Image (spheres, rainbow, N blue to C red):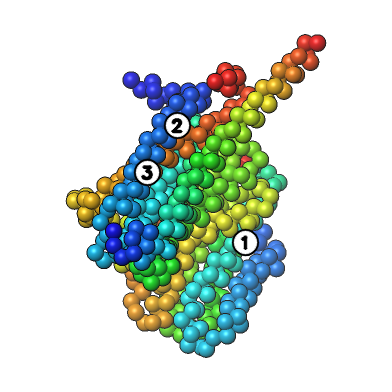
């Protein structure tokens, strides 16, 4: 029984999501981390609300970056460890499809979840509600880009001891432009200035990464697994 | 006609060529760097705006140029190793990494020291400075990734992939002063048209740039010889080569 | 040369000279480190050859 590529994609996505939801605590951990990190800044800096608002885009984005990194380590690890990845690759659909499905599933449970939780955090950071739309759009694009950058990093470090530290070391420099433009978009929304430029740039980064990263991540997995 | 090119894939050939070129590169580098430093420090006229502080350009600009040039070389060499499976490509990439990282540190440090008298600050989160800092992090990532693998060949391939992914940063560094309003000044030499710098100041700068490239050539040759030996320890040509 | 002479660098001495000193350090480190790397590799290769020769003798004797 042969399966078309779209069917295969959905099958693998469904598998990933089912596996993720079987351990709900694992899903909640990065979200809780996100919430905690964003609380650390106001507590540590003891700022007045107006100053907090100025810092909030950066705080939000740094927290989002760091909490996304937490779940990236596990992207390929368990499947690589028990040989499932190789079996799936042999299945005829190609490794790139599998990698795409896994990364999209990862984004659904980490990035998309983050976007939904962001308004709560935004209230805590005193971000005006008018900026929420821009904030959520920019976070959605940014976390998707990050999932892909993370897929490349995860592919390169799967199976290494202390791979998660190296993963962060690899992914964070690549994610810096993302941070700059994502925070800039939210910042401009707060100041009620045109956000178009920053959002377009973010979208460009997202499209660029989503187009090329699948091949880079597949190549990375082939290097580390063969 | 292309035999010289194909021979570069052969480890014993690379080892002997590197050994032959290294002293020449080093000698010429010493001459050009020596001329550049002396001319730049003692004979170039002081800038009407920056005074004698502009002389930092004679170490900062070559360091910055080398940091991106070496990264690009490393990425290209890694790509050659990855795509055509030519091991010497990986050897060159491995040799480039620590040298490039050191030049990036030098560029950042000298830039910082130049920034204080000129802009009033040791650091600014300006596009060019930020992307140069990212370059340093990329170098560290490549070095760490290569050493994290027990299988050296796998480590080479992984590091090559990372270097290629990171090469996107290099055009960003160069064009950051064009694309954004930057504190950092625009291109003075590497642009089309007449250089926007006085000739008496230009000569020592060109000399330092050339000298740095030659110096990199020498250092690359030494490191490359080491890399080749480490990868080819078991090969039969090694015994003969070590006798010399 | 003006304003205090060559070493004063027109008042900017504490920025200019550390830059050149840093450059000297970086260049020197690169050269020494590269030569050391090559020397260590040569040593390891020589040792490997000696071990190989010793094993060869063992097989024969």
Q: Quadrant of the C terminus of chain A?
A: top right
* CA gap, disc 3 and disc 2: 16 Å
Q: Is residue B102 above or below residue B244?
A: below
Pointer 2 indicates a residue of which chain?
B
Pointer 3 indicates a residue of which chain?
B
* CA gap, disc 1 and disc 2: 48 Å
Mark 1 secondary-structure assignment: helix
Q: Nearer the viewer, residue B188 or A88?
A: B188
Which residue occupies the extreme front position in the image?
C4
Mark 2 secondary-structure assignment: helix
Q: Are marks 1 and 2 on the same chain?
A: no
Q: Which residue is mark 3?
A: B33
Q: Which residue is mark 2?
A: B22
Q: Which residue is mark 1?
A: A71
Which residue occupies the extreme left position in the image?
B194
Mark 3 secondary-structure assignment: helix
Q: Is residue C35 above or below residue A209?
A: above
Which residue occupies the extreme top position in the image?
C60
Q: Residue at x 43, y 40 (%)?
A: B216
Residues at discs 1 and 2 in contact (Cβ within 8 Å): no
């Amino acid at each position: 029984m042969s399966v078309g590529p779209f069917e295969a994609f959905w099958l693998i996505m469904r598998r990933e999501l089912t596996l993720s939801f079987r351990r709900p605590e694992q899903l909640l951990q990065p979200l809780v981390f996100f919430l905690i990190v964003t609380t650390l800044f106001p507590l540590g800096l003891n700022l007045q609300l107006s100053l907090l608002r100025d810092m909030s885009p950066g705080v939000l984005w740094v927290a989002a970056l760091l909490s996304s990194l937490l779940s990236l380590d596990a992207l390929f690890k368990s499947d690589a460890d028990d040989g499932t990845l190789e079996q799936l690759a042999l299945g005829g659909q190609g490794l790139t499809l599998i990698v795409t499905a896994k990364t999209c599933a990862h984004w659904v449970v980490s990035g998309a979840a983050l976007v939904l939780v962001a308004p709560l955090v935004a209230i805590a950071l005193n971000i005006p509600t008018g900026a929420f739309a821009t904030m959520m759009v920019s976070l959605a694009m940014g976390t998707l880009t990050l999932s892909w950058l993370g897929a490349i990093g995860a592919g390169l470090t799967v199976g290494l001891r202390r791979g998660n530290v190296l993963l962060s070391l690899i992914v964070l420099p690549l994610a810096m432009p993302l941070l700059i433009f994502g925070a800039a978009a939210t910042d401009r929304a707060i100041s009620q200035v045109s956000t178009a430029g920053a959002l377009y740039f973010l979208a460009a980064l997202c499209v660029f990464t989503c187009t090329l990263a699948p091949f880079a991540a597949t190549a990375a997995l082939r290097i580390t697994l063969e | 006609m292309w035999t010289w090119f194909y021979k570069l894939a052969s480890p014993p050939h690379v080892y002997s060529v590197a050994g032959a070129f290294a002293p020449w590169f080093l000698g010429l580098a010493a001459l050009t760097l020596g001329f550049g430093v002396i001319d730049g420090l003692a004979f170039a006229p002081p800038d009407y705006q920056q005074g004698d502080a502009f002389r930092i350009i004679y170490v900062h600009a070559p360091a910055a140029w080398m940091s991106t040039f070496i990264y690009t070389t490393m990425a290209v060499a890694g790509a050659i190793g990855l795509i055509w499976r030519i091991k010497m490509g990986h050897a060159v990439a491995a040799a480039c990494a620590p040298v490039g990282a050191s030049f990036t540190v030098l560029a950042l440090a000298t830039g910082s020291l130049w920034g204080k008298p000129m802009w009033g600050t040791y650091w600014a989160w300006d596009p060019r400075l930020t992307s140069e800092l990212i370059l340093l992090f990329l170098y560290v990532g490549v070095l760490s990734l290569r050493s994290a693998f027990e299988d050296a060949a796998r480590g080479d391939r992984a590091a090559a992939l990372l270097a290629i992914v990171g090469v996107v940063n290099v055009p960003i560094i160069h064009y950051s002063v064009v694309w954004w309003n930057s504190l950092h000044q625009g291109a003075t030499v590497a642009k089309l048209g007449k250089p926007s710098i006085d000739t008496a100041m230009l000569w020592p700068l060109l000399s330092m740039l050339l000298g740095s490239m030659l110096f990199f050539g020498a250092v690359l040759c030494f490191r490359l010889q080491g890399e080749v030996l480490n990868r080819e320890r078991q090969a039969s040509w090694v015994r003969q080569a070590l006798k010399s | 040369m003006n304003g205090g002479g060559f070493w004063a660098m027109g008042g900017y001495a504490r920025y200019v000279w550390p830059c050149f000193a840093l450059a000297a350090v970086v260049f020197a480190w690169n050269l020494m480190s590269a030569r050391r790397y090559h020397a260590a590799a040569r040593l390891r290769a020589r040792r490997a050859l000696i071990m190989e020769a010793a094993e060869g003798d063992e097989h024969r004797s």
